[in-house]
Amino acid sequence: MLRRQLFDDIDAVRQGRDPKGVLRDPSRNHRIVLPSDHREYFLNGLPMAELGKEPKWERLLHHFLFHAGQPDWVKREFEAAAGIRLKHMEIIDI
């Protein structure tokens, strides 16, 4: 379905039309706020001490979840940049 939409959008651009989702009318082009379970965190962040108190964020802070397969030197650089020490995790549970 997504592939078909991408091809349709490519065809539209080739024909001089806009792809789906492009709004050029400023009165219709406004931000849509999507729901988020942690909007405040993503907008304002948390001090490092507070991150450790929140179970979800503590796991994300101390585990290299989204960088699977990276060499150890990348993990060490991440630790140095973030000022933390990563913990080993057998099972990913967010």
Image (tube, rainbow, N blue to C red):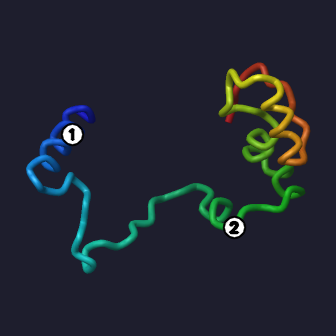
Q: Residue at x 15, y 41 (%)?
A: 8
- Say above or below: 7 vs 26: above
Looking at this rendering, what residue extends furthest in the left direction? 15
Label 1 belongs to which residue? 5
- Left or right? Give the position of 91 relative to 85: left
Quarter of the image where the C terminus is located = top right
| Residue matched to label 2 | 44
Q: Hey, what amino acid is under mark 1?
A: Gln
Q: Quadrant of the N terminus?
A: top left
Give the foreground label among 2 and 1. Answer: 1
**Residue 36 x, y percent position in the rendering:** 54, 57
Real-space Cα separation, disc 2 to disc 1, in angstroms: 35 Å
Q: Position of residue 18 (x, y in %)?
A: 18, 57
Question: Residue at 21% of width from left, 39% of height from top?
Answer: 5
Q: Position of residue 60 (x, y in %)?
A: 74, 41
Q: Quick one: label 2 or label 1, which is nearer the N terminus? A: 1
SS at circle 2: helix
Which residue is situated farthest in the bottom direction here? Answer: 27
Q: Classify 55 as above or below 50.
A: above
Element on which disc 1 rests: helix
- Tell whether label 1 touches label 2 (CB within 8 Å): no
Q: Residues within 10 Å of mark 2 (few under 14, many from 20)?
A: few
Task: Tally the numbered discs.
Answer: 2
Describe residue 61's horizontal placement relative to residue 37 as left or right: right
Q: Residues within 10 Å of mark 1 (few under 14, many from 20)?
A: few
Give whichever of 36, 71 is nearer the camera: 71
Going by the numbered disc 2, the residue's amino acid type is Asn
Residue occupying the point 80% across, 44% down: 58
The quadrant in which residue 92 appears is: top right
- In which quadrant of the rendered view does residue 31 lie? bottom left
State the mark number for residue 65. Answer: none
Given residues 61 and 26, the one toward you in this image is 26
